Image (spheres, helix red, strand yellow):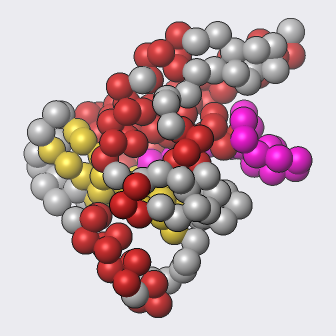
Amino acid sequence: MLELISFRYTKHPEWFRSDRICMLDAVCTQMWTAKYSEFLASPANPDCLGKLLPHDALDYYTGEETAYNRSNKTWALEIDDIYVPLFVKNDHWVACWISIPRRHIVIWDSDVAYTEDAEITETVKPIAHMLLYMLHMLSIGGEKELYTVDSHMSVNLGCHKTNKLVTVELLLEVYRMLCTWHAISTS
């Protein structure tokens, strides 16, 4: 579905609300999810930077990937919204909208009864965590402060009654991880 939307965007950008969007392929989220344990295990420098991000993360950040829909625009500077498919439970796809300025992730699920909120939360956690880290690491000047311990990446799961609970739980978990990094850098 996102490939179809991406194709329409390349042919008719005027149909979309902004030109500050990019559409990624499933390889990005699958790679980030698979490499999350390596990211967590890699040591950070004293300034909390230098953790191991997935291969090609910088290429996605600068818009050099994906091959079929290369934007050549840098996230947070020229891109505000990222659309990407997310693979849940190894047999179910959901659509994911990442708003960088709002630090917000929205999940659209066509079959809300199939997947539990907790399963989607666990699947999107690596994306939210590593994206926030990468935005902080690659930001320049005062923009770095937008992606610090005090910021967060919240998740809204479509059509479930427990949206608020899941969002708060994920925020707390990411916040605790960032606080740990901050404590290491200040000691």
Q: Is residue 121 left or right of residue 92?
A: right
Quadrant in which the N terminus is drawn: bottom left
- The one nearer the camera, 121 or 72, is 72
Q: How many marks?
A: 0
Query: What residue is at 31 percent from the left and 47 percent from the top?
Result: 26
* Picture layout, residue 58 above or below residue 183: below
Query: What residue is at 49 percent from the left and 30 percent from the top?
Result: 55
- The one nearer the camera, 98 or 152, is 98
- At which x and y percent is residue 152? 62, 42
Work out whether residue 97 can be spotted.
Answer: no
* Picture layout, residue 46 above or below residue 139: above
- At which x and y percent is residue 21? 51, 68
Asked if the magenta segment contains residue 141, the reply would be: yes
Q: Is residue 120 left or right of residue 139?
A: left
Q: Is residue 25 left or right of residue 155?
A: left
- At which x and y percent is residue 27? 33, 42
- At which x and y percent is residue 57? 53, 38
- The one nearer the camera, 27 or 36, is 27
Q: Which residues are magenta?
A: 137-155
Q: Residue furthest front?
A: 67
Q: Residue furthest bottom?
A: 14
Quadrant in which the C terminus is drawn: top right
Work out whether residue 115 can be spotted.
Answer: yes
Query: What residue is at 75 percent from the left and 21 percent from the top?
Result: 48
Q: Quadrant of residue 180?
A: top right
Query: What residue is at 58 percent from the left and 71 percent from the top?
Result: 20
* Picture layout, residue 175 above or below residue 145: above
Asked if the magenta segment contains residue 135, the reply would be: no
